[in-house]
Image (cartoon, coloured by chain):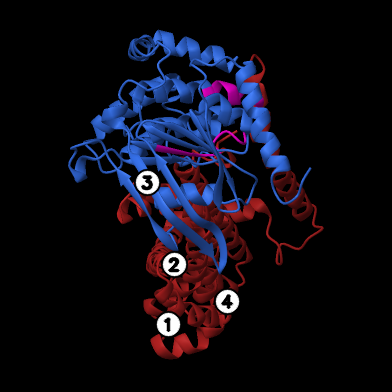
Chain colours: A blue, B red
Amino acid sequence: MLLDAVRREAFSDPVAEARQTGSSAPARQPAESGRRGIAVTVRDLHKSFDGHPVIEGLNLFLPAGGFTAVVGRSGCGKSTLLRLILGLETPTGGRIDLEGPEGSPRRSEPPKRIMFQEPRLLPWARVVDNVAVGLSGQGTRAERRERALAALAEVGLSDKAGQWPATLSGGQRQRVALARALVSRPGLLALDEPLGALDALTRIGMQDLIERIWRAQGFTALLVTHDVAEAVALADRILVVEAGRIALDLRVDVPRPRRRGDPDLARLEGRILDHLLGGSETPA
Amino acid sequence: MTTSKRDRLRDTAIPWLLPAAILLGWQAAVSAGLVSNRFMPAPLDVVRAGWEAGRTGELWTNLGVSTLRALAGFVVGGGIGFALGLANGLSRLSERLTDTSVQMVRNVPHLSLIPLVILWFGIGEEAKLFLVALGVFFPIYANTLHGIRSVDPGLMEMGRVYGMSRTELFTRVVLPGALPSIFVGLRYALGIMWLTLIVAETISASSGLGYMAMQAREFMLVDVVVLAILIYAALGKLADALTRQLERACLAWNPAYRSA
C-alpha cells in the first residue's frame, strides 16, 4: 500500500522521475558520488563510558558515496560508532577524519545529517516547517520553504505540508524526518535504526525510498541496524561489529534494484546471522 | 450531520442545568419563607442589588479598581516568576544560586504576611500589589522551570545536530516545549490572583469589590454581600475561559488541547 504510494509519487514528480530514469542502469556507484559524498576515515578509535570500553581500537574507511550498513548485537557499540562519526560523542582515543568532495572549500562542504530511531519532529511546527529545520541558518524564509516543499515531494508527502506532525502515521513521520535530513543536500547521512519502530510493510516502503534517494543524490550513507535483512537489502558493504571491533567486513555484490527474496541476498543474510549467533561468546 | 445543531445546543445546555435548578430552588425556598432573607437573600433581591449598584456607578468603580489591582499584581509577579523560571531553567548556576531560597519562601503562606504588609505599606495600593504579585509569582515560576526541564532532550539534540543557534534552540524548541506547563502555571496563578486580592481588600482597603462586601456587611446588606461573592465567581470563570481560549490558540498542535 505504502509502496504503491511511494512509487506513484515518484512517477508523478518529474524531478524524481528524471533522477529515477537517469540512474536506472544497474550501476553500483551512484551518479553524483564524486561530487557529493563525504569520505570517512577512522583510525584506532577508542571510546569508553565511565571506564567501560565500548569501542576498542576500531579502524575503518568509508569511501564517498558508498552505502555501508553496520550490524551487531545490542550493546556492541554500533550506535556509539555512528554517534562518534557524527560528532555527537567525543572519542576517548584515536581520530576520525571527514573529507568532503575534492576541492570544495571548508565552509561550503555539504553537511552531515542523522536520522534517529524516533522521528524527533517538533510537534508545534507544521510538517513543512519541520523539514525547513534542516536548513537552519540558510537562505531566506521563502527559499527555505520552497526547498522544504521540494524535499517533501521527494518523499511523497506534498499533501501533508500544512499538517501537524501529530496527525501523521508513524511511517509518514519518519518520511518527514527523512525529508528534513535530505533537504540540505547532505554529504553524509547517518541512519540510526530509523525504521526499527515501523511495521514490516511500511519498513519495506521506507527502505525502497531511502535506496532510491541515495542513488539519486550520491551522499555517503551509514546505516546502523539490528535487522540483517534490511542491511543486506540496502547496503553495498556490511560491517559486523562485535565487542567494539569490526569482526566481519562483507561486500554485497548484488545489482540494484534488488529483489526481495533474492537467493544471493538470503545466503548472505544467513551467513551474517550464523556469525552473529554462533561466533560470539554465547553460542546458540 | 443532520442532528448536529440540536446536539450542540444540548451539549451547551447541559452544564447550565444544575446551576439553573439551584437558583430556582433557592428562589422558591426564600419566597416560601423556608429561609429568612436576613441570612440569605433571594436571587431576585441580589439581581436588584446588582442593578442598583450598577445604576449608581458604585459597582463599576469598585470592579474597575479591583481588576486594575489584580492585573498590575499579576503582571509584576508573573513577569518576575516567568523571568526567573526561564533563567533557572536555562542556567545551572542561576538555579543553584536562587532555587533553594525560592523554595523556602514558597512554603510561607503569603496571606500570613498581611499584618507585616500593612505595617510596611499601610492600606495603600502597594500592599495589594505586593501580595498579589507574591502569590502569582510561585506557580508561574515553578511551572516555567518545570516546563523547561521537561523539554524532550531528543529534540534538543536534534536541534543542535541540525545546526540551530542558541537563540533558535530557545525560540523553536525550548519555549514551545515548555508552553503547556507554563499555561498550567498561568491558570493556577489566575486563581491565586483573585483569592489574594479579595482577602487583601476585605481586610485593608478603601475601595474595590472586597471593600464593597465589607461595607455591606456593616449595614447588614446581605444582598450586596452575595452579589460580591457571585461577581468573584464570574470573574474567576471569565479568567479561566480566557486562558482556555489562549491555550487553544497557542497549543493547537497538541491533540490534547484541540477543541472537540
Residue A16 location (% of width, % of height) = 37, 15
Q: Is residue A260 above or below residue B146?
A: above
Could you tell me which chain the residue with mark 4 belongs to? B
Residue range highlighted in magenta: A189-207
Camera-side residue: B93 or B83? Answer: B93
Alpha-carbon distance for marks 3 and 1?
75 Å
Residue A83 at x, y = what percent?
46, 50
The residue singled out by tag 3 in the image is A41
| B150 inside magenta stretch | no
Residue type at tag 3: Thr
Q: Residue at x 32, y 20 (%)?
A: A31
**Residue bearing the label numbered 2:** B85
Q: Residue at x 32, y 38 (%)?
A: A38
* Residue A47 seen in this snapshot: yes
Q: Chain of mark 2?
A: B
Disc 2, SS: helix
Distance Cα–Cα, label 4 vs label 3 = 88 Å
Q: Position of residue B7 (x, y in %)?
A: 67, 25
Task: Give the CA distance from mark 1 to mark 4.
Answer: 19 Å
Judged left or right of residue A171, residue A164 is: left
Q: Nearer the viewer, mark 3 or mark 2?
A: 3
Can residue B206 be seen here? The reply is no
**Nearer the camera: disc 1 or disc 2:** 2
Q: Which one is earlier in the sequence, the residue at label 1 or at label 2?
A: 2
Q: Which residue is mark 4?
A: B218
| Residue labelled with disc 1 | B123
Q: Amino acid at mark 2?
A: Gly
Q: Amino acid at mark 4?
A: Glu
Local crowd size for mark 1, using a 10 Å CA cut-off: few (<14), some (14–19), many (≥20): some
Within-10-Å neighbours for mark 2: few <14, some 14–19, many 20+: many
